[in-house]
Image (tube, rainbow, N blue to C red):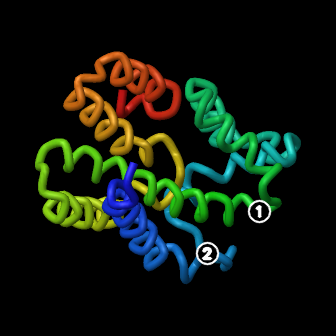
Amino acid sequence: MTKNKYLYPSLAALIGFLIAIQVVGPLLFNDNVVQDDFRQSMFWVWRFWDPSLFPNDFIADIYSGSFDRLPLLWIIYAVAPFLTSNLIFFTKFAAIILAALTSLVAFLFFDKLSSNKILSLGFTTAFATMLWCTDHLSVVHARSFIWIFILAVGYFKLSCKDQLASIMTLVSLFISPIAF
């Protein structure tokens, strides 16, 4: 394996990371600024730290009840307390990592469609920018994983790896039913 084989995929991940840093980076360490979806639908995740929070809040119960249908996404947030004591920071940092991974998968997909690496990198850059404009990645919830799964399944199908595409489709059911 040559170093050049990893150059363009690494650049694609770096592009996703840099775009995410431009959006989330200035706010990464500011707990007073959160994304709108976090404020509206992710506040109840604090129950992973303290199960006694929001004892009579039916909205928190509604959201946490829907989370039971997403066991892999639940695991992502259940391990968060072992990584950090700050859910807001965890969510912002996870969005940056997810952006880099989504850009990497986008590059692999576009590279299968076109053997021109520069063109694939250009499409990846446009796609990564579009993700932030449509607000899909700014909070790590089910909607944030839509594109990584769609692109991964497309990549595996184009690579004639139907079993991996099927496994990826199944995994998407437990993180992002919307992608499924």
State the quadrant of the C terminus: top left
Q: Please, is residue 107 above or below residue 78 in the view?
A: below
The quarter of the picture where residue 120 lies is bottom left
The residue carrying mark 1 is: 86
Residues at marks 2 and 1, CA–CA distance in whole angstroms: 11 Å
Residue name at image x 45 percent, y 34 percent: 176
Question: Residue drawn 36% across and 16% down?
Answer: 163
> Picture quarter containing residue 147?
top left
Nearest to N terminus: mark 2 or mark 1? 2
Q: Secondary structure at mark 2?
A: loop
Residue type highlighted by circle 2: Leu
Towards the viewer: 170 or 92? 170
Which residue is tagged 2? 28
Is residue 156 shown left or right of residue 172? left
Q: 156 or 26, which is in the foreground?
A: 156
Q: Residues within 10 Å of mark 1 (few under 14, many from 20)?
A: some
